[in-house]
Amino acid sequence: MQHRIYERLISAPAPTKTLEQLLNNLNDVGRFYEAYPEEEAVQGLVSHMREFMAPSLRRQVVAHLSHGGVGMKTIVRTAVRRLKELT
């Protein structure tokens, strides 16, 4: 019984985030970093994205920025541009 449950858990598709949720999360992190000097804030956001976001999600936000980045805070836009330069 436990074996079947385990197999179902590991074979289940990973949860996905909608773009709106992703932008809300990034903007929340951006609000945290607003208290920091700009360069430190950008570096902190880039580090956060590299450490906590799957590559597919990072590609999604980079693509969103290339289409205008609607809904991104300025600090998030800057960090996503930097992330794009680093990849």
Image (cartoon, grey):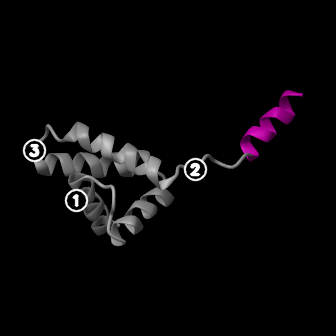
Q: CA distance from mark 2 to mark 3?
A: 32 Å
The residue carrying mark 3 is: 37
Residue 64 vs 37, above or below: the answer is: below
Assign a secondary structure to mark 2.
loop
Left/right placement of residue 44 relative to residue 1 reads: left
Instruction: Tell me where residue 36 appears, x and y as whole percent.
Output: 13, 40
| Label 3 Cα crowd, 10 Å radius (few <14 / some 14-19 / many 20+) | few
Dividing the picture into quarters, in which one does residue 70 lie? bottom left
Predominant secondary structure in magenta? helix
| Amino acid at pointer 2 | Thr
**Mark nearer the N terminus (3 vs 1):** 3
For residue 41, side relative to residue 19 (left or right): left
Please name the residue shown 24% across and 37% down the image. Answer: 32
Q: What residue does disc 2 label? A: 16
- Labels 3 and 1 touching (C-beta < 8 A): no
What amino acid type should be assigned to the residue bearing mark 1? Thr
Q: Is residue 15 left or right of residue 60?
A: right
The residue identified by callout 1 is: 78
Q: Nearer the viewer, residue 46 or 19?
A: 19
Sequence order check, earlier mark of 1 and 2: 2
Q: Amino acid at mark 3?
A: Pro
Magenta stretch containing residue 46, yes or no? no
Q: Nearer the viewer, residue 46 or 24?
A: 24
Q: Are marks 2 and 3 in contact (CB under 8 Å)?
A: no
Q: Residues within 10 Å of mark 2 (few under 14, many from 20)?
A: few
* Magenta part of the chain: 1-11
Where is 25 relative to 84, above or below?
A: above
Location of residue 10 (image quadrant): top right
Which of discs 2 and 3 lies nearer the camera? The answer is 2
Among numbered discs 2 and 3, the one appearing first in the sequence: 2
Q: Residue at x 13, y 51 (%)?
A: 39
Instruction: Kindly state the secondary structure of the residue where label 3 is placed.
Output: loop
